[in-house]
C-alpha cells in the first residue's frame, strides 16, 4: 500500500522534472534573441554588472568622474546688457562717443554664451597660452617647445593674464570656477593661477574649499598635467554664474531689507580729489546710514560690509566689483574719468568692467562722467550730479 503510493509520487516528480527542463530549454533558446538589457529585466540578474562593479571598486571616485565627464558643452541663456543710466545728457554723449559701448548693449549673441569644460589627457600650460573665452583647446594638448618644469596629475587652470587679484577675479577666475564647480570637491585637484593670490581673493577661494595648498602658482616655463580640466571657455560676465556663486557662498540678503549707502574708494590712490567733500555731503544726507569704506581684505569683512548696501558709490576701479556681496537689485553709481572722445582713465581697468559686472550681478547701474585731471584718471566729482543721481536711484529701488 505504502509502496504503490510512493511509486505514483516518484512518477509525478519525474514528470515535473521533464516539464521544467523543457521550459528552461525553451527559455534558453528565447534568451539568445534578447539584448542584454532585456535579459536583465527578465531574469533580474545582471551578468556584466558584477564584473563592472569589481573594476570600479579599484578606481577612485575622481577617476570615475573623469571618465563620466570628458567634455561638457553648454550655451548659457541669452541676457540683456542694458545701458547705463545717466542724469546728465552731456555725460551720455561722451559715453556714446565710444562706439564699442553702443555695440555691446542689448541681447548678447549666442557666440558669446558658449561654455566648455573638457578633460585633456594630457594637457599643457605655458606662458603665452591664454585661458579666455576665445581659447583654442587644441593649443593645450600640444607639447610646448619650452622645457616642462613641473608634472602634475590633475590640474584645473583658473588662470588669467593679470594675476590672482580683484582686477581679474570676478570676470576672469570666478566664472571658470563656477562653471567647473562639480570638480572642486575632489581634493586631489590643484588649481592653476598666476603668481600668488591677493588676501581677499585667497579668502574667497577658501570659502569654496580651495585652500592655498590646492593652488599652483604659475611662474613661467611650461607644465604638463596627466589630466587637465580646461574650463577657459565661459562667458566672463553672466547672470547665471553670479547667481550660482552667491548661492554657494550664502549671499542672500534682500535689497528690501538694505538701507546702507556705501562710498567705496581704493586705499592707495587719490583718484577722487574731492573725496572729503563727497564724504561730508553723504554724511549730511544719510547720517548713520552712510558708510565710508576702503579696500577690504577678507571675505567675512566684505560680506558684512555689503550685506545691507542699498546704494554703492565708487570711482572707476576694480574694487567696485565687491558689489557682488551686496543684495541683488541695489544701485551702483560709478564715476568714470572719461575724455571727450570717450576714452576712459585709468586705461588699465576695462572701461566696461564695472558696468557689465553690475548688470550681470542683477544690480541697477548709474554712471557719472567727469573729466580726468591726471594720467591715472583722478577726477573731481560734481556734487550736484551725484545728488541728482541719488534722487533717481533712491526712487528706483
Ligand atoms: C533690454 O533692456 C532695455 C532696457 O531695459 C529695453 O529697453 C530693451 O527693450 C531690452 N531689449 C530686449 C531685446 O529685450
Image: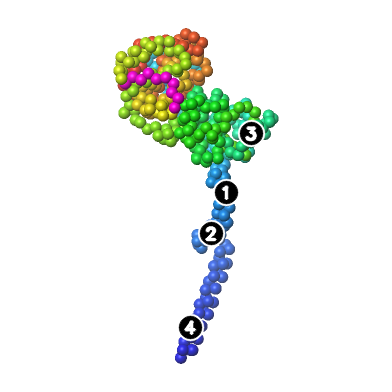
Give how far apart the Cα atoms at labels 4 and 2 are: 37 Å
Is residue 145 something that shows in the picture? yes
The residue that label 1 is drawn on is 59
Mark 3 vs 4, N-terminal side? 4
The residue that label 3 is drawn on is 150
- Residue 292 in the magenta stretch? The answer is yes
* Left or right: where 289 falls relative to 1: left
Mark 4 vs 2, N-terminal side? 4
The residue that label 2 is drawn on is 46
Q: Which x, y percent locates residue 366?
A: 39, 19
Is residue 362 something that shows in the picture? no
Mark 2 vs 1, N-terminal side? 2
Callout 2 crowding tier (Cα within 10 Å): few <14, some 14–19, many ≥20: some
Looking at the rendering, the stretch of residues picked out in magenta corresponds to 289-298
Secondary structure type for disc 2: loop
Report how many numbered discs are placed on residues in the image. 4
Frontmost of labels 3 and 4 is 3
Give how far apart the Cα atoms at labels 2 and 1 are: 21 Å
Mark 1 vs 4, N-terminal side? 4
Callout 1 crowding tier (Cα within 10 Å): few <14, some 14–19, many ≥20: few
Mark 2 vs 3, N-terminal side? 2
The residue that label 4 is drawn on is 9
Secondary structure type for disc 3: strand
Amino acid at each position: 500500500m505504502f509502496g504503490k503510493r510512493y511509486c505514483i509520487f516518484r512518477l509525478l516528480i519525474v514528470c515535473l522534472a521533464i516539464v521544467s527542463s523543457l521550459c528552461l530549454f525553451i527559455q534558453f533558446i528565447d534568451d539568445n534573441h534578447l539584448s542584454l538589457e532585456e535579459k536583465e529585466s527578465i531574469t533580474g540578474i545582471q551578468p556584466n554588472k558584477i564584473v563592472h562593479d569589481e573594476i570600479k571598486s579599484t578606481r577612485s571616485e575622481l577617476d570615475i568622474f573623469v571618465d563620466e565627464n570628458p567634455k561638457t558643452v553648454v550655451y548659457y541663456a541669452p541676457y540683456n546688457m542694458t545701458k547705463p543710466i545717466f542724469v546728465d545728457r552731456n555725460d551720455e554723449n561722451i559715453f556714446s562717443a565710444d562706439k564699442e559701448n553702443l555695440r555691446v548693449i542689448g541681447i548678447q549673441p549666442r557666440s558669446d554664451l558658449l561654455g566648455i569644460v573638457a578633460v585633456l589627457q594630457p594637457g599643457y600650460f605655458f606662458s603665452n597660452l591664454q585661458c579666455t573665452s576665445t581659447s583654442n583647446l587644441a593649443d593645450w594638448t600640444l607639447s610646448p617647445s619650452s622645457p616642462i618644469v613641473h608634472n602634475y596629475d590633475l590640474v584645473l587652470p583658473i588662470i588669467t593674464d593679470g594675476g590672482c587679484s580683484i582686477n581679474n577675479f570676478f570676470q576672469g577666475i570666478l566664472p571658470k570656477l563656477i562653471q567647473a564647480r562639480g570638480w572642486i570637491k575632489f581634493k586631489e585637484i590643484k588649481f592653476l593661477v598666476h603668481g600668488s593670490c591677493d588676501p581677499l581673493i585667497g579668502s574667497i577661494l577658501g570659502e569654496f574649499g580651495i585652500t592655498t595648498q590646492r593652488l599652483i602658482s604659475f611662474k613661467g616655463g611650461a607644465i604638463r598635467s596627466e589630466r587637465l580640466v580646461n574650463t577657459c571657455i565661459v562667458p566672463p560676465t553672466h547672470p547665471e554664474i553670479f547667481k550660482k556663486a552667491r548661492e554657494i557662498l550664502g549671499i542672500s540678503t534682500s535689497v528690501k531689507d538694505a538701507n546702507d549707502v556705501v562710498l567705496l574708494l581704493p586705499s592707495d590712490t587719490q583718484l577722487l580729489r574731492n573725496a572729503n567733500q563727497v564724504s561730508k555731503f553723504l554724511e549730511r544726507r544719510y547720517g548713520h546710514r552712510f558708510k565710508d569704506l576702503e579696500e577690504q581684505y577678507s571675505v567675512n569683512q566684505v560680506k558684512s560690509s555689503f550685506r545691507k548696501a542699498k546704494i554703492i558709490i565708487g570711482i572707476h576701479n576694480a574694487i567696485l566689483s565687491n558689489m557682488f556681496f551686496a543684495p541683488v537689485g541695489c544701485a551702483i553709481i560709478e564715476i568714470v574719468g572719461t575724455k571727450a572722445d570717450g576714452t576712459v582713465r585709468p586705461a588699465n581697468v576695462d572701461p566696461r568692467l564695472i558696468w557689465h559686472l553690475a548688470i550681470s550681478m542683477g544690480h541697477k547701474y548709474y554712471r557719472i562722467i567727469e573729466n580726468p585731471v591726471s594720467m591715472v584718471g583722478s577726477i573731481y566729482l560734481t556734487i550736484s550730479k551725484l545728488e541728482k543721481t541719488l534722487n533717481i536711484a533712491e526712487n528706483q529701488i
